[in-house]
Image (cartoon, rainbow, N blue to C red):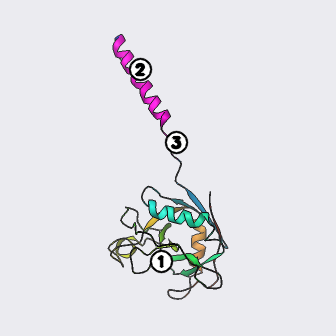
Amino acid sequence: MGIVNRSTFLSIVSSFVVAASFAWAQPVQAADPVVVLKTSLGEIDIQLDPKHAPITTANFLAYVNKKFYDNTIFHRVVKGFVAQGGGMTPDGNEKPTDAPIKNEATNGLHNVRGTISMARTNDPDSATSQFFLNFVDNSTGKLDPGGFSPEGYAVFGKITKGMDVLDKMEALAGAGDGPPTQQILLISATVK
């Protein structure tokens, strides 16, 4: 490095001081929230993605924080497709929910193996509490925009721990599009 004159040196130092003060003043960004689903087959950690799915993430966390998901079941488990839960009691009754949210399926995230997405009716903006976990890549031509439903299904996170539990769920898939061969209980959902 060449010799630097005094004014250039002072300019460089002041730039570092300003940059350091700015960085110090900025709030520390928390990591994306992780929710632990404690199931009758084991635990699954899901890292949520509020950057790409802010509405969906906030909705899911609201249900988690009020313990809505505790003691519910995965009522639909389809081999080679998804495990759906988040709204039915062990005796098969549907729980009352909050108002539906806007579909965020065009957020750039894809319905690939190990992701979590919002379940909904044929109305794109009808998702409430129910969600599904993708057993396989269900993106192109399936659950992403332009697939079964042109509007797609909103992905809002991914499994970071517990893929073995996801595989156990798939192994209990029933015939067709219905319930598993053995009840899969969602004991609790908590923010880690």
Read off the magenta span. Answer: 6-29
Magenta segment main secondary structure: helix
Q: Earlier in the sequence, mark 1 or mark 3?
A: 3
Place residue 109 in its image quadrant.
bottom left
Q: Amino acid at mark 1?
A: Phe
Identify residue for label 2: 13
- Which of the two labelled residues, at mark 1 and mark 2, occupies the earlier sequence position? 2
Q: Looking at the picture, how far across and down is residue 20, in whole percent?
A: 46, 29
Kind of residue sitting beneath label 3 = Val
Q: Nearer the viewer, mark 1 or mark 3?
A: 3
Residue 8 colored in magenta in the image: yes
* Cα–Cα span, label 1 and label 2: 58 Å
User: Tag 1: Cα neighbours inside 10 Å, few (<14), some, or many (≥20)?
Assistant: some
Measuring from the top left, give residue 96's x and y in whole percent: 56, 78
Quarter of the figure with the C terminus: bottom right
**Closer to the camera: disc 1 or disc 2?**
2
Q: Answer few, some or many: residues within 10 Å of disc 3's Cα (few below 14, many 20 plus, some between 14 and 19).
A: few
Amino acid, disc 2: Val
Residue assigned mark 1: 81
Q: Is residue 3 visible?
A: no
- Secondary-structure class at tag 2: helix
SS class, disc 1: loop
Which residue is denoted by mark 3 in the rendering? 28
Q: Secondary structure at mark 3?
A: loop
Horizontal relation, residue 82 to residue 186: left or right = left
Q: Looking at the image, is mark 2 or mark 3 earlier in the sequence?
A: 2
